[in-house]
Amino acid sequence: METKNEYFMKKQEKDEVAEAEKRKKMMKNLIRLLIALAVVGALAWPIYSYFHKAVEQANKPLSGEYFEAQSRDHITVGQEHPAYNSNPPTGGWHYAQPAQSGIYDKEFPDEQLIHNLEHSHVWIAYKPDLSADQIEKLADIAKGYGSKIIMTPRVANDSPIALVAWERIFKMDSVDEVMVREFIDAYRGTAGPEKLADFGFKDFRTGK
């Protein structure tokens, strides 16, 4: 027959086991909670960063001068059309075939590059007599992006450098890296009515 002392010893053992199980369960729940918080934090941070950047961008004054696109019509190569309302043009009549992204030492017809702008590219147009070190600075900036950006000389520029996006243009006499990057970040991939259309554009750094 179980003595009173044995009864209390067994009860104490049961209580200790129950307490240990309780602590173990609490520890498991705590670990699960910490893991869940870590996962939520890992997912929430990029989402927060994205929207925070978007809000910051929305609150910034828009870079460049605005010119309403006169048309989105395709025209045949060499076909005449009304004069563009900006120099370089920021929208309007254009050829059906855009140019590939890249840094070029040759000119392209405005009508071809307007199609690039329609697909949310940024066009860096510079006068051919711009100094070599200025051209190199612009090229170094362009190389940091790779896709949806095109850089070309342009004789008809009325400023040494023109940054062009769909319906936006920003002119400068010399390279201001901060302003160049602000313009590219504001409009590359976002300006242009066909920004989501896939035209087979590649990252000129990788060819992919």
Image: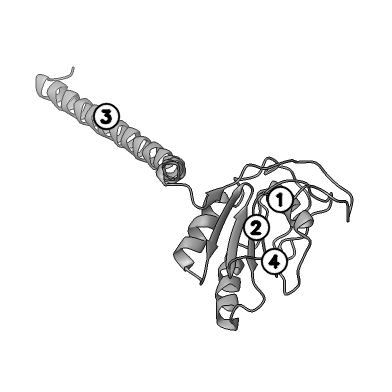
Give the residue type that dot 3 points to: Lys
Mark sitting earlier along the chain (1/3): 3
Instruction: Answer above or below: position of 4 versus 62.
Output: above
Residue drawn at 38 percent across, 36 percent down? 32
User: Which residue in the structure is indicated by mark 3?
Assistant: 22
Residue lying at the far left of the rendered structure? 5
Gap between marks 1 and 4 measured at Cα: 13 Å
Q: Secondary structure at mark 4?
A: loop
Residue lying at the far top of the rendered structure? 1
Residue 81 located left or right of residue 152: right
User: Which residue in the structure is indicated by mark 1?
Assistant: 84
Q: Quadrant of the C terminus?
A: bottom right
Q: Are marks 4 and 2 in contact (CB under 8 Å)?
A: yes
User: Which residue in the structure is indicated by mark 2?
Assistant: 87
- Residue 193: % across, % down: 68, 40
Badge 1: few (under 14), some or many (20 or more) residues near its Cα, within 10 Å? some
Task: Please name whichever residue, 73 or 19, is drawn nearer the observer in this view of the structure.
Answer: 73
Residue 136 located left or right of residue 110: left
Give the residue type that dot 1 points to: Tyr
Residue 39 located left or right of residue 23: right
Q: Secondary structure at mark 1?
A: loop
Gap between marks 4 and 2 measured at Cα: 8 Å
**For residue 151, which quarter of the picture?**
bottom right
Q: Are marks 2 and 1 in contact (CB under 8 Å)?
A: yes
Badge 4: few (under 14), some or many (20 or more) residues near its Cα, within 10 Å? few
Give the residue type that dot 4 points to: Ala
Instruction: Look at discs 3 and 4 and give the one toward the viewer.
Output: 4
